[in-house]
Image (cartoon, grey):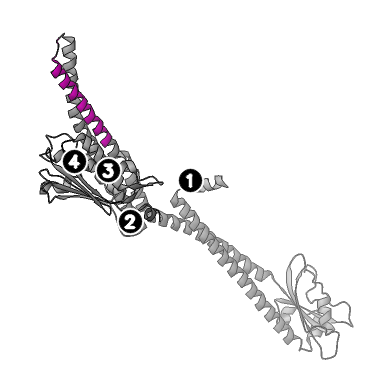
Amino acid sequence: MRSRERWHYRRSLASRVTLLTTIAVGLSVAFVALGAFVTTRVQLGSSLDSSLLERAQQAATQTTLANSVRADIPPWALGAGDIRIAFIDLDENPPIFSADRAGDPRISLGEEELAVALRQEPFSLRTVDTGEERFRVVAVPAGASGQGQALVLAQSLAPQERVLGKLGFVTVLFGIAGMITAGIAGWAVASNGLRPVRRLTGAVETIARTEQLTPIQVEGDDEVARLATAFNQMLLALELSRTRQRQLVADAGHELRTPLTSLRTNIELLDQADAGGLSLPAEARAELLADVAAQIEELSQLVGDLVELARDEPLPTVVEAVELAEAVDHAVERVRRRAPSLRFDVDTTPWVVQGETGTLERAVTNLLDNAAKWSPPGGTVRVHLDRGVLTVDDEGPGIAEHDLPHVFDRFYRSEESRAMPGSGLGLSIVAQAASRHAGSVRAERSPHGGARLVLELPGSPSLVDAHS
């Protein structure tokens, strides 16, 4: 069964359409032809029976008919050249047909005709096969006296059978011609109807071979046009994804080049000093090693940010309830250790979010790191969480108007930030985390003079509400 299905689907769509069309038309022609043949046969038989019975009843009223039959007058002489006549008289034995002569097939009468002669049946009508020819035989009562007489007429079915044979031949001939015509028409329809599909297939194969994501020309508004439109949308999404991937690789290469170059330079200085027997001052050596450690830390953070941004998979099916206020407190403790000169003003209320703990804590930490980087020594970073809206204000120079739409783009760095450490990925990670948790993030001007970053996450005030 499976092999037959595989064979069927290995055929081209055009050949399947042609085959199915031919089969459908062939079955239709066969049923119509069979119906026409059966109807014609029944009508011819019914007309023959009616005509033969009517002629027999009319002939039975002729008193001279019996004497004509006994005298062996041929039927054509009596105006009935297409039939054979017999007269049953039970006083005579045996009854004979007027045409029972040498060389003619003999028609044997039976109980049906005897029943008519005995007035047990009003008439009889049956088909008799002599072995050489088939006859339609009718018997009606005859004679004015009582029982014992009947008139029998027999007409050959050969003319009718010849007509039916010709009709059957013509029907089969036209049926075959109709099937051939249907096959040709089906192939033409399939070829013309599937032309857009073949054109679409060719375009897709060209795109797969050349990797040029050129949109496909859409014609009409049928199903094939909808398929082409959907494919163009897929090509657009693929092109955007490839563009983002290339941009990410290019930006990552650019951002990685700087710390790697600086790290290699410092290591070469240390190596040259040791190889040349030169002794660097302790302070200079400690400064170089501290610079190397800082560059390694920056490189590690950059690699971690790239890995985080490269994750395109959705949230896992099983998520956990994250207490956002606790995540903010943990993030504040980490950033406070890295920026001991700053003061953190924290005001939070409980808020539970369904999501990934690590992702949310990293997003909050990035917001606080950004505020700490821009705040002056001795400044204050204000953190406020109320009903899922986390607001982080710093006291830095703020964000310029032309930079506000781009602060969450990957590797975007304003003119003022190019001389400062960082890769331009921290806020991109925040935007990605917000999107993955059905939230949003935006940048504004802070009323305290610096920048304000606002992260909104859907959730509930308590664990009970979060699980309900």
The mark closer to the camera, 1 or 2, is: 2
Where residue 457 appears, as percent x and y from the top left, is 28, 51
Q: Looking at numbered disc 3 in the image, what kind of residue is underneath it?
A: Asp
Q: Which structural element holds mark 1?
A: helix
Which of disc 2 and disc 4 is earlier in sequence? 2
Which of disc 3 and disc 4 is earlier in sequence? 3
What's the CA distance linking mark 4 and mark 3?
16 Å
Q: Looking at numbered disc 4 in the image, what kind of residue is underneath it?
A: Asn
Q: Residue furthest top?
A: 277
What's the CA distance linking mark 3 and mark 1?
64 Å
The mark closer to the camera, 1 or 4, is: 4
The image's mark for residue 173 is none
Which of disc 2 and disc 3 is earlier in sequence? 2
Q: Which residue is mark 2?
A: 225
In the image, 236 versus 46, the foreground residue is: 236
Q: Looking at numbered disc 2 in the image, what kind of residue is underneath it?
A: Ala
The image's mark for residue 329 is 3
Q: Residue at x 84, y 79 (%)?
A: 114
What's the CA distance linking mark 4 and mark 2?
49 Å
Q: Which structural element holds mark 3?
A: helix
Q: Which structural element holds mark 2?
A: helix
Magenta segment? 278-305
The mark closer to the camera, 4 or 2, is: 4
**Magenta-span inclusion, residue 269:** no
Q: Is residue 214 above or below residue 420?
A: below
What's the CA distance linking mark 1 and mark 2?
25 Å
In the image, 250 versus 380, the foreground residue is: 380
Where residue 425 appears, as percent x and y from the top left, is 22, 39
Q: Which residue is mark 1?
A: 10
Do the numbered discs 1 and 4 sit on residues whose CB atoms are within 8 Å? Answer: no
Q: Which residue is mark 4?
A: 370
Q: Is residue 412 above or below residue 271?
A: below
